Image: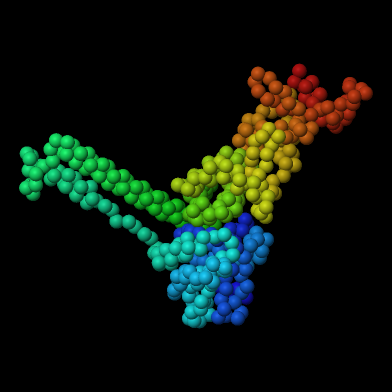
Amino acid sequence: MAGKWLATVQQTSSGRPVFLENEIECSLVSAVDLECDELSDFPSLKSGLLILTTHRLLWLPPDSSTSSPSSAVSLPLSSVSHIHSSKKSLKSIFHSPRVRFQASLNPGPRSVAITIVMRGKGDCDAFLGKFWENWRARAWEKESESESTRSGRGGDSQSKSGSANVSGGFYTREGAVRMVGVSGILRKEQEMWESTDKSLQEAFLDLNALMSKAKEMVMLAEKMRQKLLSGSNSQTGTTNDEEMGSKEEMQDWLLSVGIISPVTKESAGALYHQQLSRQLADFVRIPLERAGGMMNLIDVYCHFNRARGTELISPEDLLRACSLWEKFDVPVMLRKFDSGVMVIQNKSHSDVEVFARIKALVTDPDALRTGISPSDAAMTLGIAPGMAKEHLLTAESKGLLCRDISPDGFRFYINLFADINTDDVYLIKDHSMYATWVRVASASS
């Protein structure tokens, strides 16, 4: 029923909406109803999450991770024809805050009144202000925005300051008496403070311009990455390995440049950590696949902050976002090893497969004599030595390996104690790992 009047919204595996190109998230409000009294068959949208972006109004069901994808709907801001201002009355004190606007829905040009009912703790006035701001900005009509340079501003200020000091004596060019003595000192100090204040204002303007340009660069990088992905899919048979390697390297670089619409405390409010957790789950999916299904939490923190650009998060926010994955149906999880090292891994990641590769490495004839180090395991598993050491220690706790600590560091060997008979330690069973070790030791000696 929702598809008749409202467009459906695609969602990621974590329940986050899939945004359009250059679409930026601006505000989130929980426990929101959408009502339309003029349409009898308007869908029942109760207690959902309302997301205001630069292009659309998105409504997601309360538990978006378990609901069907067709439950999430959207309304483009381009269809909104008028937003009613909020009226304070005695009746509004005892009712949930409401925002009414006129919009033209899909079938036909008829304009209907739609009401946003906020049953949660959202700030209605703040949301209405951002609603007005994004509707008037009409970002969907602007394919690219470029700010004009202020080339003449510096020259004008220099010419003004230079002309003020050309004439000397007690009189200025305009014939006014110059300030001398204490009054002149105070006047000169005041002018200096005014000049400093003006310089600071111009500096902040330049900083805002830089941040806006940074967002444009992020959008450009995303477009280039999509073109590279489409190009590699369509020309797989005509490119050689070197060209494919360079394209993959460029894709990795563009992927780490930035997230177009990062979740911020200003836009998400009380839902900040919840939405940050969902966005993080979507972000780490590709890096985890390329890292073998597991990444150190510190590496994830660096990658995620680099992708967010100027909207950095603290380590506490990252840890809290990861801890919320237990409440959501997302394909990733936070894991803590016995040593205290915390990692992020796919739920489909299996330690059994890792242990099988470690066992194949440690039962190699050379490894049976000299053992393996975390660096050897890191090269085989394709992961960092620190992560490889954690896997080796876990395999040791499962009884698969034994550890030897020497001045050269940790060395791990296959556990032979399971094949040794305690009643007769000299008994060697045929086709056992102990028998293989004896043959290798005898051959080397």
Q: Is residue 382 above or below residue 128?
A: above
Q: Position of residue 166 (x, y in %)?
A: 10, 42
State the residue in front, 83 or 155: 83
State the residue in front, 359 or 170: 170
The reply, left or right, for residue 283 in relation to residue 151 is right
Query: Is residue 379 at all visible to an observer of this figure?
Result: no
Asked which quadrant contains residue 16, the reply is bottom right
Query: Is residue 175 at all visible to an observer of this figure?
Result: yes
Q: Position of residue 227 (x, y in %)?
A: 48, 57
Q: Please, which residue is most extreme toward the front here?
A: 90
The reply, left or right, for residue 369 in relation to residue 104 is right
The residue at 68%/20% (across/down) is: 406
Q: How is the image coloured?
A: rainbow
Q: Is residue 339 above or below residue 30?
A: above
The reply, left or right, for residue 307 in relation to residue 156 is right
Q: Position of residue 263 (x, y in %)?
A: 52, 53
The residue at 35%/51% (across/down) is: 209
Q: Position of residue 385 (x, y in %)?
A: 62, 33
The residue at 64%/46% (across/down) is: 323
The residue at 16%/47% (across/down) is: 160
